[in-house]
Amino acid sequence: MTRFILTAVTIAVGHVATAADPAPKPAEFKPKLAHKIEGHTSDVAAIAFSPDGTRLATASKDKTVRIWDVKTGQRKVRIDIGAAAYAIAFSPDGKKVAVGSFGGAMAVYDAETGDGVGKGFALDDSVVLIQWSPDGKLLAAVTFEGYAIRLLDADTGKEKLALKGHTKPVNNVAFAPDGGLIASVGDDSTIRVWDPKTGKEKDSFKQHDGQVYALAFSADGKTLVTGGEDRTVIRWDIKTGNIRKPVMELPKEDHGGLAAVGELPDGTIWTASWGWGYTVVDPADGRLLARKPSFDGRIAWGVGKSYHHKHFALCPDGKHYAVADGKTVWLMDASKSFGGEKKKD
């Protein structure tokens, strides 16, 4: 099964329709509600699936983190953290969760027992984004309205490097599959690529019109896919910085702006936007294969528009996704709506 790297993942997008082309007619998929996840007493600010897809973690402003069984919808673990939780991420082996909260507190917990792992640590402002490095040794953290990505030792919390270069707040970060690079996007419309060993910026790309929210590396680490306010999905050659054309622009009627992207096991692209809906795109020619015009109100605004991608999560199995809506999380079964078996080489 192809893994997607949160918050957005990779894929090639192709042909953009012209006036001479017949208008594509995507199917309208109808995912089923698997579970209505309830229990939080304040808004859910971030959600994340475990790497094996069996659990869903939710971080809430009610000062708790909860871990749920995807199959049954039942809560497995509750962790009281003492402050509003704004960010959460499973470790690569699925055994731990890292949590960031209001005021800058961060901590790592055992995902099975909820017990703290090591000592907690703190940054200088509320932590709104967290990503683990593929080897589980580093945590990349971003604070509210922060312009830098902080690289922390996952065991001690000691800051090893600060990646500085964005001129406006950072909206998202992603590690390359081998951990050799980090990419970030922000309100300054740029995509920046960093060396996590030295903290030096290796490259900077700019093509999007407006803020950029979603990004992910391809499985081979050679391509970076980004999306944002302008509703376009752009593929970047990570070695040259060139755009792999054509650029795919998603339907205006479906997308108020691209908030999240995911790669399904069959290689097609799943996208989600705030205020509107989902689409599924064929990687070969860019055709829309399926669409759901709206969330039926199932969307939360959370900390701010720049962090909407934290309210969407695509399960690694490609058969489920989750959407945070206030205190509730809707866990959806889309196994018969999109995706499918992984394509054979």
Image (tube, helix red, strand yellow):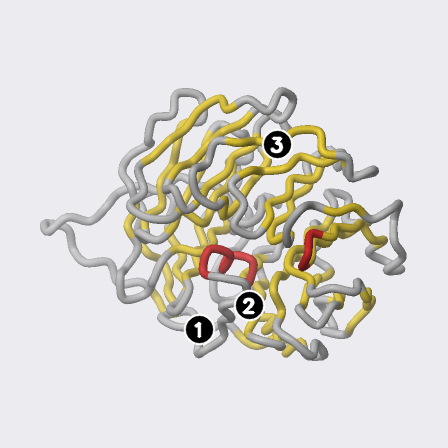
Identify the residue at image location x=49%, y=71%.
299
Can you identify the residue that label 2 sits on?
323
Can you identify the residue that label 1 sits on?
295
The amino acid on which the numbered mark 3 sits, given as a three-letter code, is Ala
User: What whole-number distance in Å separates the C-alpha atoms at marks 2 and 1?
Assistant: 9 Å
Q: Residues within 10 Å of mark 2 (few under 14, many from 20)?
A: many
Residue located farthest toward the left when viewing the structure as drawn: 20
The amino acid on which the numbered mark 1 sits, given as a three-letter code, is Phe
Judge whether 205 appears above or below 293 on screen. Answer: above
Does the residue at mark 2 contact the one at mark 1 (Cβ under 8 Å)? yes
Of labels 2 and 3, the one closer to you: 3
Q: What element carries label 1?
A: loop
Counting from the top left corner in percent of width and height, residue 283 is at: 38, 44
The amino acid on which the numbered mark 2 sits, given as a three-letter code, is Val
Q: How crowded is mark 3: few (under 14 residues within 10 Å), some or many (20 or more)?
A: some
Identify the residue at image location x=89%, y=45%.
118
**Residue 324, numbered circle:** none
Q: What element carries label 2?
A: strand
User: What whole-number distance in Å separates the C-alpha atoms at marks 3 and 1?
Assistant: 37 Å
Counting from the top left corner in percent of width and height, residue 64 is at: 75, 68
Identify the residue at image location x=62%, y=26%.
196
Whichever of labels 2 and 1 marks the residue nearer the N terminus, that label is 1
**Residue 162, numbered circle:** 3
Counting from the top left corner in percent of width and height, residue 337 is at: 48, 66
Q: Is mark 3 on a helix, strand or loop?
A: strand
Q: Residues within 10 Å of mark 1 (few under 14, many from 20)?
A: some
Q: Nearer the viewer, residue 142 or 53?
A: 142
Counting from the top left corner in percent of width and height, residue 181 is at: 57, 27
